[in-house]
Amino acid sequence: MSGQAASEIADPATEERAPRLNRNDWLDLAQKVLVEEGIDQVKIQVMARRLNVARSSFYWHFESREALHRAMLDDWLTKNTDPIMDRALRPAPDVILALTNVFECWIDETLFDPELDIAVRLWARRSEPVRAVVLRADQMRLDAIQKLFLRYGYAPEEALVRARVLYYTQIGHHTLEETETPEMRFSHGPAYLHIFSGLVPDATQIQALRASIEEKYYRRRKEISLK
């Protein structure tokens, strides 16, 4: 029997465990490997060893590696694009509070995972189909933010440019190596609201931003530290 054939045969205990893994076990590991090691290391055999199951377990949930890749992109869209669109379209009494809703995505990594976003963009440099998905996601995010500005009376071109400035600034923060602490960055929040909207936030609006940072960022950091 060849070594490859032998590697496909698991002991009975392993085979019994295999179906108990759910689809998200494979998907979560694939995303973790993508972030830490790149798409080249998202390999069925390698992940099976890390999950301590037979390779055949993978095929309970995915038809092929390509099917896993599609699921990874769908998962990325759900995690990193849906929350931006949701918050950009969320009703608010004024544009500054509407922007504060969007800022939730930049301060809470459960709403926007920056490391995953960077990893998918690196993957896109090597795959035209993936690049097409990334470009579509960027456009969806920008369209939602532009609609935010349009709701508050900005002219179409101004709404577009403000949306681009806001979005490109945030993506740039993640793709460049940041040198300032989160606390320092958050201290500039009112100035960012001013620059993005063209309006000076009042005390109530600044307090709403600070409350969002307290709730979304610091609570999350505390939860992580307690694990």
Image (cartoon, rainbow, N blue to C red):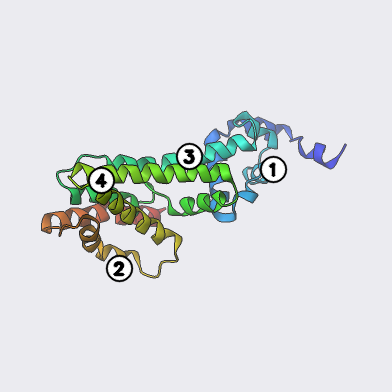
Residue at which label 4 appears: 156
Question: Would residue 126 appear left or right of 182 to someone viewing this image?
Answer: right
Q: Which residue is painted at 19% across and 52% down in the image?
A: 96
Q: Residue at x 62, y 29 (%)?
A: 60
Residue 19 in the image, given as x and y percentages of width and height:
61, 30
Give the quarter of the figure containing the N terminus.
top right
In contact (CB < 8 Å): disc 2 and disc 3: no
Instruction: Give the residue at mark 1.
Output: 45
Question: What secondary structure is found at the residue carrying circle 3?
Answer: helix
User: Comparing marks 4 and 3, which lies closer to the viewer?
Assistant: 4
Q: Residue 3 lies in what quarter of the image?
A: top right
Mark number, residue 75: 3
Label 1 neighbour load within 10 Å: few <14, some 14-19, many 20+: some
Query: Which is more foreground, mark 1 or mark 2?
Result: 2
Q: Nearer the viewer, residue 86 or 27?
A: 86
Disc on the earlier residue, 1 or 3: 1
Earlier-in-chain disc, 2 versus 3: 3
Question: What residue appears at the point 43 percent right and 53 percent down from the top-left corner?
Answer: 114
The first of marks 1 and 2 along the sequence is 1
